[in-house]
Image (cartoon, grey):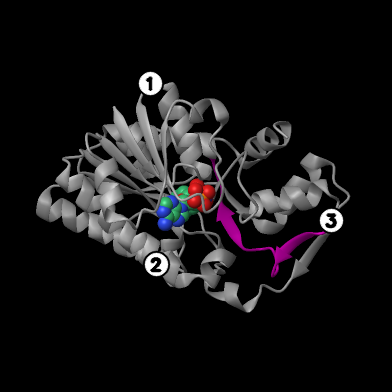
């Protein structure tokens, strides 16, 4: 297949690019290299790389000619980055997605797989793991724009028959991630024997999904038609204090775990509990992300 990946030089996108190239697909990556280029050298020689902006409608339209699928992953993310640039965050989401949808419809692209986020659940009530049916609670510029795009894609499906999947990623982590995110930040602090800084009490929980499981789900979902919102979640609930301790143990670090107040700009992002259900993913493709956090963290450490 011929596949366009927006944001394909990023953490998740570069792993997806590598996998799709290995499977023999023709891959075009559109990325403005806001975060540098994470595509490995060998893969890079086998793709068409375009340094450009997903907000450029003509560019997106031209690049999607003849494509079978678009993975739309370009985004501005990371709590501190988004808090400092909420307008750019929303513009890249909303204008970028509109461009991708228009291009797909004009060029008869069969499917869009869009990177949404578990951030959409905000402070949604949790009794059991979050399913796609619970009432969502997006509060930040980032989560609100992602939710808007989920509904925008659903609307295009209803009115024009577009096939699309909104992937609600739950804290994806793995090798080659940069330290905007908590796992690489803790590894860096632990390896340097510097204090591992935990915001608040450290009792807040998250569901960490290993990159290889995430990519497997992204690829297998190519088989599914229609419009779907689907969690990509591991279903293991870990608190941040235990994550810090686990990374400390794995690295044999002498770091202390230091509790600090979250900066004011992070308040809207601070959520007490988040764990996702992967039941729907299992129903759709009979797959569950099952790498445990301990296994995933050890893989990262062994690759260093
Ligand atoms: N990593 C996670 O845990 C996580 C969780 C939920 C959702 N997501 C979503 O998954 C997708 C990929 O995330 P990631 O972790 O790989 O992040 P990333 O920052 O590593 O990758 C995003 C890529 O988009 C590119 N980009 C940004 N603005 C652009 C623009 N205007 N035009 C073209 N390219 C642009 C960046 O240069 C970067 O390479 C994003 O849409 C993100 O919102 C990620």
Which region of the structure is painted magenta? 194-210
Residue 170 visible: no
Question: Considering the numbered disc 3 on the image, is that residue within a helix, a strand or a loop?
Answer: loop
Residue 185 drawn above or below residue 63: below
Drawn side of residue 197 relative to residue 148, left or right: right
Q: Quadrant of the C terminus?
A: top right
CA neighbours of label 2 inside 10 A, class few (<14), some (14 to 19), many (20+): many
Residue 126 drawn above or below residue 104: below
Question: Considering the numbered disc 2 on the image, is that residue within a helix, a strand or a loop?
Answer: helix
Q: Which mark is residue 24?
A: 1
Q: Is residue 205 a member of the stretch shown in magenta?
A: yes
Drawn side of residue 185 relative to residue 100, left or right: right
Q: Given this view, does label 1 or label 3 mark the residue nearer the observer?
A: 1
Looking at the image, which residue is at 53% across and 36% down? 39
Q: Position of residue 56 (x, y in %)?
A: 32, 56
Gap in Å between the C-alphas at discs 2 and 1? Answer: 34 Å
Question: Considering the numbered disc 1 on the image, is that residue within a helix, a strand or a loop?
Answer: loop
Q: Position of residue 202 (x, y in %)?
A: 69, 63
Find the residue positioned furthest to the left: 159
Q: Which one is earlier in the sequence, the residue at label 2 or at label 1?
A: 1
Gap in Å between the C-alphas at discs 1 and 3? Answer: 44 Å
Label 1 with label 3: CB-CB less than 8 Å: no
In this figure, which residue is indicated by the disc labeled 3? 194
Q: Quadrant of the N terminus?
A: top left
Q: Which mark is residue 192?
A: none
In this figure, which residue is indicated by the disc labeled 2? 90
Residue 174 visible: yes
Q: Position of residue 98 (x, y in %)?
A: 26, 58
């Amino acid at each position: 297949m011929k596949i366009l990946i927006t944001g394909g030089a990023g953490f998740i996108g570069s792993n997806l690019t590598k996998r799709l190239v290995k499977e023999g697909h023709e891959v075009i990556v559109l990325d403005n290299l806001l975060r540098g280029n994470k595509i490995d050298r060998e893969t890079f020689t086998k793709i068409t790389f375009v340094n450009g902006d997903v907000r450029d409608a003509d560019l997106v339209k031209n690049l999607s000619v003849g494509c079978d699928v678009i993975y739309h992953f370009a985004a501005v993310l990371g709590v501190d980055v988004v808090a400092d640039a909420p307008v750019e965050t929303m513009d890249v989401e909303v204008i970028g997605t509109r461009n991708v949808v228009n291009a797909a419809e004009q060029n008869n692209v069969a499917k869009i797989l869009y990177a949404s986020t578990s951030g959409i659940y905000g402070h949604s009530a949790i009794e059991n793991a979050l399913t796609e049916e619970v009432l969502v609670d997006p509060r930040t510029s980032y989560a609100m724009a992602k939710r808007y795009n989920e509904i925008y894609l659903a609307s295009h499906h209803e009115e024009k028959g577009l096939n699309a999947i909104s992937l609600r990623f739950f804290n994806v982590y793995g090798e080659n991630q940069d330290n905007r995110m908590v796992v690489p930040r803790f590894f860096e602090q632990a390896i340097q024997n510097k204090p591992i800084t935990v915001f608040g009490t450290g009792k807040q929980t998250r569901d960490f999904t290993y990159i290889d499981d995430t990519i497997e789900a992204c690829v297998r979902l190519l088989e599914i038609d229609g419009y779907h919102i689907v969690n990509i979640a591991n279903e293991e609930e870990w608190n941040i204090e235990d994550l810090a301790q686990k990374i400390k143990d794995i690295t044999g670090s002498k770091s202390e775990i230091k509790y600090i107040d979250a900066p004011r700009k992070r308040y809207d992002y601070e959520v007490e509990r988040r764990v996702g259900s992967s039941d729907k993913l299992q129903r759709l493709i009979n797959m569950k992300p099952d790498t445990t956090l301990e296994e995933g963290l050890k893989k990262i450490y062994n690759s260093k």
